[in-house]
Image (cartoon, helix red, strand yellow):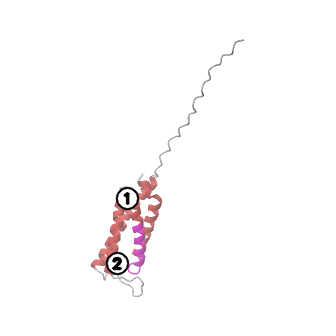
Amino acid sequence: MAAPKSTPQRKPAPARTPTPAPAPAPQRSGAAVGLTVFTAIVMMIAGFYSIMTGLVAVINDTFFVAGENYIFQFDLTTWGWIHILLGFGVAVAGFGLFAGAVWARTVGVVLAIASAIANFMFIPQAPIWAIAVIVLDMFIIWALTTHGRDITE
């Protein structure tokens, strides 16, 4: 009896691992980019307004009426310089947003917080104006923290 011939066994082909599909590119929201551009414009305008308020206080410190009994009493010339410096910083950060700079978002939020605090303390000298600037600052903070990243992508 003849020995059965062994047939060569085929090695199984190595299992192919499926290549994962590339992740879809993140969609930029046109509304979010538009809101960020609008925020940059608001920052430039708010910065300009703060600079103008500061110049008025520095040039003519009798223009604003200082209340007698307010805990945050400073010389109006000091207030003027505070507003000039904050306004300049906010305006520069607004210009930086157009370039998509991440530093501009961070600086914008920090300076908007500082501007809101400074204008809160400035309420006795110009109540309606200070409250309007505080509202703009709150909008800037909200817009930069929720949609600021969309312009950089």
The quadrant of the rendering that contains the N terminus is: top right
Q: Quadrant of residue 66?
A: bottom left
Q: In the figure, 69 relative to 19: above or below?
A: below
Outermost residue on the left side: it is 59
Q: Are marks 2 and 1 in contact (CB under 8 Å)?
A: no
Q: Quadrant of residue 35?
A: bottom left
Q: In the figure, 60 relative to 21: above or below?
A: below
Identify the residue position indicated by label 1 in the image. Answer: 97
Q: Is residue 152 left or right of residue 21?
A: left
Q: In the figure, 130 relative to 7: above or below?
A: below
Chief secondary structure of the magenta portion: helix
- Nearest the viewer among 144 and 32 is 144
- N-term-proximal mark, 2 vs 1: 2
- Nearest the viewer among 126 and 146 is 146
Residue 78 magenta-highlighted: no
Kind of element beneath mark 1: helix
Residue type pointed to by label 1: Leu
The boundaries of the magenta stretch are: 110-128
Residue 71 in percent (x, y) is at 42, 84
Residue sitting at 44 percent across and 70 percent down? 135
Q: Is residue 21 left or right of residue 49?
A: right
Residue 83 in percent (x, y) is at 34, 73
Residue type pointed to by label 2: Trp
Q: Which mark is residue 107?
A: none
Marks 2 and 1, Cα distance to the nearest angstrom?
Answer: 27 Å
Q: Is residue 133 visible?
A: no
Q: In the figure, 52 relative to 97: above or below?
A: below
Kind of element beneath mark 2: helix
Identify the residue position indicated by label 2 in the image. Answer: 79
